[in-house]
Amino acid sequence: MRIKALDSIRGILLLQMTLDHFGKPISHYLYQCFGFFSAAEGFFFLSGFVGALAAFSKSAKDPKQTWMRSRAFKIWKYHSITLAAVAIAACTILTPIREYFSNFPEHPVLVSLWSIPMVNTPDYLDVLPLYVVFLLIGSALFPQMIRGNILAIWCASVALWIAGQYGLRDTLNSLFPRWINHGFFDPLCWQFLYVTGAAIAACWKRSQVFTPTFFKKFDRLIPLLFIILVFLFLWRHEYIPLQQPSKFWISKAAIGPLRFVNFMVFVSLVSWIVRRFPSALDFKVTNVIGRHSLDVFTAHIVLVYIWLATPGSIRYHEPWNIAAPIAACLLLWLLAKIREPRQK
């Protein structure tokens, strides 16, 4: 059974990412609005959390979690078709976005070959490949979590995240040709969000940590967590006279330590709201979007590239740069509604 609030939250995150990717003026107020983190962190964390819940519920009928590999292959097909379509459009009719695919005209065959295993991932097309990788890895790790090996897996994830903080990704990327676009996100670091979400879900399902006693103690921390979140919010928006943290602490590509802490504080507060008021974040509009996240996310990529190809006289001026992202969100909702199964 799906948890409606989680679908709704996923839908909210998808809409926020869409508005962020369409740029200013809306993104000026919306991007990282709660602190040193964005909607993307929530999307990856939630995917790990929901994925682990699904793994537990399907473990009896599918102990090897083959559904995860099937899902990974489906996402890979969505990604590959979208990449091919947008790249061809960039080199033919949508020439303003050709800069995002500059290596395709120079090395068409090799770039295409490196794109098949998702080594080459242009901007905005570097998220779905991470999901493919995480699902494939999760199909091996989640059965171990179900058996109780949660802490060991999470500690290994922490170690990989720490290695990513000190440039392991750059070392690995140096093994490939320089003209390959490896995308913005560091997989070695972003896996930490995915695995953390999965580990929390696994602990919850096994009742190893999240007992009634735990929640009583946790509730006492809510005021403190709220104060921390408000402080980080004020710091992020420069409302207090403190120098902004260095890139190491708040890096988005590598999930800096402060960014991770800030995000987890926010998650803790959201989880408290969902637990105490189950319907507070359950909205019909975002719920339907969350149920069809793959279709919506893929469509949002196409819409963003079309917007980037729009002349600057429109893209950088009102009311178009306000109306267009709102219209895009409405189109994504309409797509999700169309994808809803018909009631018999």
Image (cartoon, grey):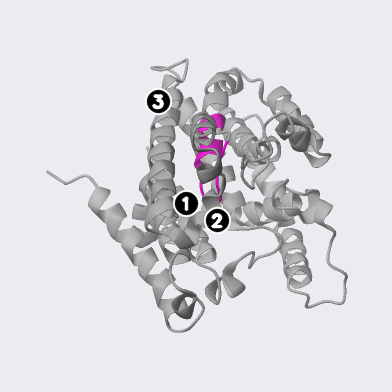
Front label number (3 vs 2):
2
Q: Under tag 1, what secondary structure? A: helix
Q: Which residue lies at the image location 48% right of the left edge and 64% below the top edge?
A: 308
Q: Which residue lies at the image location 51% right of the left edge and 43% below the top edge?
A: 104
Depth check: 257 or 173 in front?
Answer: 173
Q: Which residue lies at the image location 61% right of the left edge and 44% below the top edge?
A: 183
Q: Which mark is residue 190?
A: none
- Residue kind at label 2, given as amino acid type: Glu
For residue 318, above or below residue 89: below
Q: Of the residues under marks 2 and 1, which one precedes in the sequence?
A: 1
- Residue kind at label 3, given as amino acid type: Ser
Please identify the residue farthest to the bottom as the structure is shown: 318
For residue 175, above or below residue 243: above
- Residue kind at label 1, given as amino acid type: Arg
Q: Which residues are magenta?
A: 120-133
Question: Crowding near pointer 1: few (<14 within 10 Å), some, many (20+)?
Answer: many
Front label number (2 vs 1):
2
Please identify the residue farthest to the front as the structure is shown: 106
Front label number (1 vs 3):
3
Q: Under tag 3, what secondary structure? A: helix
Residue that mark 3 sits on = 70
Residue that mark 2 sits on = 99
Q: Position of residue 47 (x, y in %)?
A: 52, 41
Q: Position of residue 115 (x, y in %)?
A: 51, 34
Q: CA distance from mark 3 to mark 2?
A: 33 Å
Q: Which mark is residue 10?
A: 1
Question: Crowding near pointer 2: few (<14 within 10 Å), some, many (20+)?
Answer: few
Q: CA distance from mark 1 to mark 3?
A: 21 Å
